[in-house]
Image (cartoon, rainbow, N blue to C red):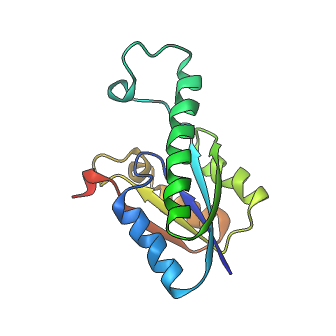
Amino acid sequence: MRRCLVLANQTLGGPRLLDALQQRMAAREHEFYVVVPATPVAEQEREPGGEGEPADRARAVAAQRLTSALAEIRGLGAAADGEVGDRDPVQAVRLALRRFSADEIVVSTLRRGASRWLRADLPSRVERSFGLPVEHVVGGSEAA
């Protein structure tokens, strides 16, 4: 069984990411571990009347995305687990790899121009930092 760590936030559950996971499952049995960094929540994502500290709100949004994504991945027939990670995506991967020994990493981002992760060259940084194969998926409706 192949073990795949998935790093995503705003694009989690998008059709391109789910397609990439299904392709893996079609080729070989997979187990997925999803890491959702608790990155700051943009104003447009906040619920009206949303209260609490920004860090608490970021964790709540990430947890909600994680719960939905795990249900979708399990609905595809795959074993899946995950966690809300550190706000720094590289640190989130580092900590997750202590709990989940991955064979590969899928990094899902918004499209170029909209993605802070791409501006920071995150897919390449993750590959260099952990020595695992990384596939970059441009996800979400913004990718169209």
Query: How far across and how far down the image is residue 64, in percent?
Result: 52, 39
- The quadrant of the picture occupied by the C terminus is bottom left
Q: Is residue 119 above or below residue 18?
A: above
Quadrant in the picture for residue 17: bottom left
Q: Is residue 122 above or below residue 18?
A: above
Relative horizontal placement of residue 75, taking residue 2 as reference (left or right) = left
Query: How far across and how far down the image is residue 110, in percent?
Result: 35, 52
Q: How many marks?
A: 0
Q: 17 or 125: nearer the eye?
A: 17
**Furthest-bottom residue in view?**
27
Quadrant in the picture for residue 30: bottom right
**Furthest-left residue in view?**
144
Q: Is residue 143 above or below residue 66?
A: below
Which residue is pictured at 78% across the width and 57% down the height?
Answer: 98
Query: How far across and how far down the image is residue 63, in percent?
Result: 57, 39
Which residue is pictured at 39% across the width and 24% down the height?
Answer: 46
Q: 132 or 83: nearer the eye?
A: 83
